[in-house]
Amino acid sequence: MRFLADESCDMTVARALRAAEHDVAVVRERGTGLTDAAVARIAQEEQRILLTEDKDFEGLRADGLPIPEPKWP
């Protein structure tokens, strides 16, 4: 699987996924200071699952549109 670990993601998680032979890109290895929207867009463009511990990602989509509320039965 392909993952993108945000700056807030614990590197232990990234190392464990890499050890399990997953493709893990780490934002900190590319630089710092990217906005949440930029990180989300990178994940979308590179078709990666975004790993974050940042609560600010709630309600954010890479295209800037709000995430619809889930509809529970």
Image (cartoon, rainbow, N blue to C red):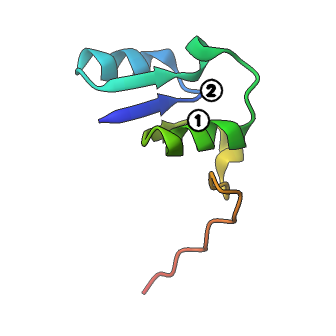
> If the image is split into quadrants, where does the N terminus sit?
top left
Picture coordinates of residue 16, whole percent (x, y): 33, 18
Left or right of 59 on screen, residue 45 = left
Picture coordinates of residue 53, whole percent (x, y): 58, 35
Q: Amino acid at mark 2?
A: Ser
For the residue pair 20 and 47, the one nearer the viewer reads as 47
Name the residue furthest left. Answer: 20
Left or right of 16 on screen, residue 59 = right
For the residue pair 63 and 60, the one nearer the viewer reads as 63
Task: Note whether 43 is above or below 72 in the view shown.
Answer: above
Task: Note whether 57 is above or below 59 in the view shown.
Answer: above
For the residue pair 36 and 16, the one nearer the viewer reads as 36
Picture coordinates of residue 28, whole percent (x, y): 61, 16
Q: Quadrant of residue 41?
A: top right
The residue carrying mark 1 is 53
Picture coordinates of residue 47, whole percent (x, y): 42, 43
Q: Amino acid at mark 1?
A: Glu
Name the residue furthest bottom. Answer: 73
- Crowding around mark 2 (Cα neighbors within 10 Å: few <14, some 14 to 19, many 20+) is few
The image's mark for residue 8 is: 2
Disc with the residue nearer the chain's start (1 vs 2): 2
> Which residue is pictured at 66% across the width and 47% down the height?
57
Left or right of 41 on screen, residue 45 = left
> Which residue is pictured at 58% across the width and 22% down the height?
27
- Crowding around mark 1 (Cα neighbors within 10 Å: few <14, some 14 to 19, many 20+) is few
> Which residue is pictured at 42% across the width and 20% down the height?
14
* SS assignment at label 2: loop
The image's mark for residue 6 is: none
> If the image is split into quadrants, where does the C terminus sit?
bottom left
